[in-house]
Image: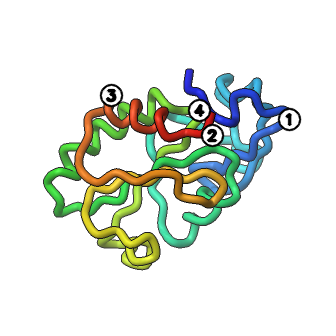
Amino acid sequence: MISSTTDNAPGPVLVVCPHCHSPNRVPNARLAEAPSCGRCQKPLFDGKPVSLGVDHFTAHISRGGLPVLVDFWAPWCGPCKVMAPQFELAAAELEPHVRLAKVDTQSEPTLAQRYAIRSIPTLALFKGGRELARQAGAMSAADIVRWTRQHLPA
């Protein structure tokens, strides 16, 4: 289990659906019980990162109640390709307490510019719309999980 501000939070957590991007209120105690989206009925967590573009980025980063770990990457980047399966493994371990997302900086240059992404891959951890931490360079799944846990608020 991961330590985060959602672990002991009273009441529901706002979880943005990775499929239809609708907000869902999920009781904190039921996050690990495979909740489904109230709108599209698909699972809110499937152990895989969600691909985000400019249209849905803000919904996940600012409106959702979960911390979001974003991998800024590009399809032509060798280290990004090496890290992609490691990021998926980290998603399987960190969910449902952290949402993992990927942003293709080649397809979404606006997001890359907005967050001043200078090298890829770059991981950025967000909570409540604020960036908590940033790390450039490819990492193993274990290092991604460790780094994320280290930077989450207690």
**Which residue is depicted at the point 84% across and 32% down?**
10
Pick whichever of labels 3 and 1 is earlier in the sequence. 1
Mark 1 highlights which residue? 11
**Which residue is depicted at the point 46% across and 51% down?**
133
Pick whichever of labels 2 and 4 is earlier in the sequence. 2
Residue 142: image tag:
3
Pick whichever of labels 3 and 2 is earlier in the sequence. 2
Query: Which quarter of the figure is the N terminus placed in?
Result: top right
Neighbor class of circle 3 (other Cα within 10 Å; few <14, some 14-19, many 20+) is some
Quick one: 47 or 80, which is closer to the camera? 80
Are dots 2 and 4 in contact, CB under 8 Å? yes
Pick whichever of labels 3 and 4 is earlier in the sequence. 4
Mark 4 highlights which residue? 96
Quick one: 134 or 111, which is closer to the camera? 134
Real-space CA distance between mark 3 and mark 4, rounded to the nearest whole angstrom = 17 Å
Q: Position of residue 113 (x, y in %)?
A: 40, 77
Disc number lying in front (2 or 4): 4
Which residue appears farthest toward the right when viewing the image? Answer: 11
The amino acid sitting under disc 1 is Gly
Real-space CA distance between mark 2 and mark 4, rounded to the nearest whole angstrom = 9 Å
